[in-house]
């Protein structure tokens, strides 16, 4: 889709800003996207998490990159790449925007291991790195996801809609050694001299599974052509790599990077990367990373430069950091420092090319610290010493792979989280990112998913939607063989997805069109209300006499002075004087009805809930 910048539009005082709008012609209609200049604070993030490969296939020509099959040799696709890519994701950005999303977290786009490991407890299938957690080359985009140009277009189009972009990053470990990588890069040895370039299939008569792939990881000089002893803990270098928990340990047998000390000894580049980079490929190489394909520095410094290069090249707004507790806070802080500098460089270079170049929000880092819930005062030091702005909040879905074990927030949680994270001005030292579904726990699917929408999306603090929460995407059991893979099933778009541009057209004021699916429409209405009003996630909360909630938030530097009333009672006369003045014109973000404040109150027609904000 081609967009162009047009004249500035002055928003009402509640929007507090002037900026360029963006128009797109879709289905013979011109639609105005007023997204890039909406008031924003990371404290009010409504984050949409997408496993790119499972979302939308926009380019079928890249589906089998590096020889990856769509169906493995056992006939399964539970662990294969399904075809989703950045072209497909870009095509659905209006849909995502219609949910009131102001930030998107995408699975790691870096080039992943080319081959497979054994999948599931029984090793029934081949398990590929479609999820992005088995990094191979951190300076190249994975070809299954698309090209550098595809990714640049995605980021730019997201920014035009006011959507910040976060990518998943992994500093703790590399991907496993696979037969395909051994073939492609000539490292390692097989168990009995098998040719790693030939397809290996387990022999059932011998009781073999895909876990029995013929890779001999014992100490041997043939592994020196891979990462090398200076880079990772790995059996092939004489250092046992098991499943121990902690710094300098191999989580789930994954080779652990030796990056605990950011000022550690300088290392040479790995042999396989040096050979790979000797033949550049402009379609996939990250230009800003090229200077860091040479030289000598610590492992942590190489990693931090490689990852920060994505920020400098594309204007990435933040990172979701994997396995936080297995990397030192010093190394995380180094990464944050490099990324802050990289974003400043990108903004200076891209004035007039991308609306995000005019944004002033700091580079953002949130992280996965398993079982973490709340630490707003940063007693643990993850903000001060590690550079984190928030950590993911596991409270509402803390378990491993189980079905429907989530806890839905209720009004008591609003009150609890309001005390933890609500501020009239400023922010807490360490924020949170709450979720009800995730790729590592379960899909939260309760009987009333419309009620789940407003209970969750109106929670103070930041929230994260997992793709398909809004459409009740089902766990398909990975094609019937693996519950965990089923948590990452393909996205189920609504039947009326062709209307996505109309749903997103007026999110900055009040949408005129929503999905015909009443549950999805609820997610859209509540999410868009949150999008327009920073006070929902960031504001100081006060409970009103009728049981409703007033939330207020100010940021004088950005010109934000925002207030909302969330009415959850049955009373038709709502006392709104704590948030609004007499004569204020209000709109209900849920019903679209308008009201005028008289004597500190409005008389409303109540449905399930009333979301009162200044009329736009």
Image: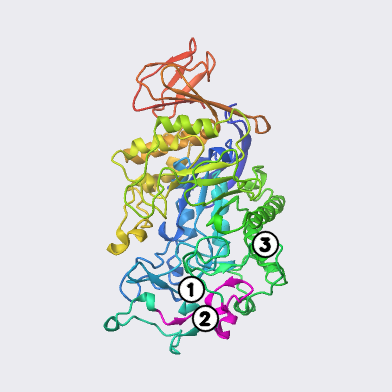
| Residue count near mark 3 (Cα–Cα under 10 Å), binned few <14, some 14–19, many ≥20 | some
> Which residue is rendered at x = 32% and y = 55% of the image?
475
Tell me the element at label 1: loop
Q: Which residue is mark 3?
A: 261
Mark 2 vs mark 3, foreground winner is: 3
Q: Can the viewer see residue 3 in this picture?
A: no
Task: Name above or below for residue 207 compared with residue 336.
Answer: below
The first of marks 1 and 3 along the sequence is: 1
Q: Nearer the viewer, residue 262 or 349?
A: 262
Q: Is residue 538 among the parts visible in the rendering?
A: yes
| Marks 2/3: CA–CA distance | 31 Å
Q: Position of residue 30 (x, y in %)?
A: 49, 43
Marks 1 and 3: CB-CB under 8 Å? no
Residue 327 located left or right of residue 134: right
Residue matched to label 1: 114
Residue 573 within the magenta-colored segment of the rendering = no
Magenta stretch: includes residue 233: yes
Q: Dots 1 and 2: beta carbons under 8 Å?
A: yes
- What span is in magenta? 213-238
Query: Residue 48 vs residue 497: left or right?
Result: right
Residue under label 2, please give it. Answer: 184
Task: Give coordinates of residue 286: x percent, y percent.
Answer: 62, 65
The front one of 136 and 385 is: 385
Gap between marks 1 and 3 measured at Cα: 29 Å
Residue drawn at x 36%, y 38% as measured from the top left: 452
Q: Earlier in the sequence, mark 1 or mark 2?
A: 1
Disc 2: CA contacts within 10 A as few (<14), some (14-19) or many (>=20): some
How many residues crowd around disc 1 within 10 Å: few (fewer than 14), some, or many (20 or more)?
many
């Amino acid at each position: 889709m081609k967009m162009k910048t047009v004249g500035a539009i002055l928003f009402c005082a509640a929007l507090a800003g002037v900026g360029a709008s963006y128009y797109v012609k879709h289905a013979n209609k011109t639609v105005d996207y007023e997204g890039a200049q909406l008031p924003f604070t990371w404290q009010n993030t409504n984050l949409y998490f997408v496993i790119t490969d499972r979302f939308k296939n926009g380019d079928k020509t890249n589906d089998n990159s590096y020889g990856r099959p769509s169906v493995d040799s056992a006939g399964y696709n539970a662990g294969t790449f399904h075809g989703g890519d950045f072209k497909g994701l870009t095509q659905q950005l209006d849909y995502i925007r219609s949910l009131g999303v102001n930030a998107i977290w995408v699975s790691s786009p870096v080039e992943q291991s080319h081959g497979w490991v054994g999948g599931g407890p029984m090793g029934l299938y081949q398990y590929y790195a479609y999820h992005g957690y088995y990094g191979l080359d951190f300076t190249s985009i994975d070809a299954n996801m698309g090209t550098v140009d595809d990714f640049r277009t995605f980021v730019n189009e997201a920014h035009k809609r006011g959507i910040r972009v976060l990518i998943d990053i992994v500093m703790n470990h590399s991907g496993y050694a696979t037969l395909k990588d051994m073939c492609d890069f000539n490292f390692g040895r097989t168990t009995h001299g098998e040719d790693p370039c030939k397809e290996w299939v387990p022999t059932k008569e011998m009781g073999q599974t895909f876990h029995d792939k013929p890779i001999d990881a014992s100490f041997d000089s043939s592994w020196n052509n891979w990462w090398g002893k200076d880079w990772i803990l790995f059996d092939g270098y004489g250092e046992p790599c098991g499943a121990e928990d902690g710094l300098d340990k191999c989580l789930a047998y994954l080779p652990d990077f030796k990056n605990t000390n950011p000022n550690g000894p300088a290392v040479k580049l790995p042999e396989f990367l040096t050979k790979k980079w000797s033949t550049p490929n402009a379609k996939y190489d990250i230009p800003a990373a090229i200077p860091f394909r040479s030289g000598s520095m610590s492992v942590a410094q190489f990693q931090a430069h490689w990852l920060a290069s994505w920020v400098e090249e594309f204007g990435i707004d933040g990172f979701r950091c994997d396995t936080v507790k297995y990397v030192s806070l010093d190394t995380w802080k180094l990464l944050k420092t490099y990324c802050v500098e990289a974003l400043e460089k990108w903004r200076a270079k891209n004035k007039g090319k991308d609306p995000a170049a005019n944004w002033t929000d700091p580079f953002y880092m949130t992280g996965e610290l398993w079982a973490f819930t709340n630490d707003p005062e940063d007693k643990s030091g993850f903000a001060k010493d590690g550079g984190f702005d928030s950590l993911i909040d596991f409270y509402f879905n803390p378990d491993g792979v189980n079905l429907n074990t989530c806890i839905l927030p209720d009004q008591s949680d609003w009150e609890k989280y309001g005390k933890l994270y609500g501020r009239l001005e400023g922010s807490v030292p360490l924020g949170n990112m709450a979720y009800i579904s995730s790729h590592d726990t379960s899909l939260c699917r309760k009987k009333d998913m419309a009620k789940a929408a407003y209970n969750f999306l109106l929670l103070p603090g930041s929230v994260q939607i997992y793709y398909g929460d809004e459409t009740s995407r089902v766990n398909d059991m990975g094609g019937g063989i693996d519950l965990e893979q089923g948590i990452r099933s393909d996205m189920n778009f609504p039947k009326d997805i062709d209307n996505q541009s109309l749903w997103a057209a007026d999110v900055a004021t009040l949408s005129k069109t929503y999905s015909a699916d009443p549950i999805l429409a609820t997610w859209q209405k509540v999410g868009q209300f949150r999008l327009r009003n920073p006070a929902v996630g960031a504001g100081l909360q006060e409970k009103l006499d009728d049981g409703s909630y007033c939330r207020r938030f100010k940021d004088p530097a950005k010109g934000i002075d925002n207030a909302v009333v969330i009415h959850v009672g049955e009373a038709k006369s709502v006392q709104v004087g704590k948030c609004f003045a007499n004569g204020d014109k209000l709109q209900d973000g849920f019903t679209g009805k308008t009201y005028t404040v008289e004597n500190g109150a409005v008389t409303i027609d109540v449905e399930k809930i009333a979301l009162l904000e200044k009329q736009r």
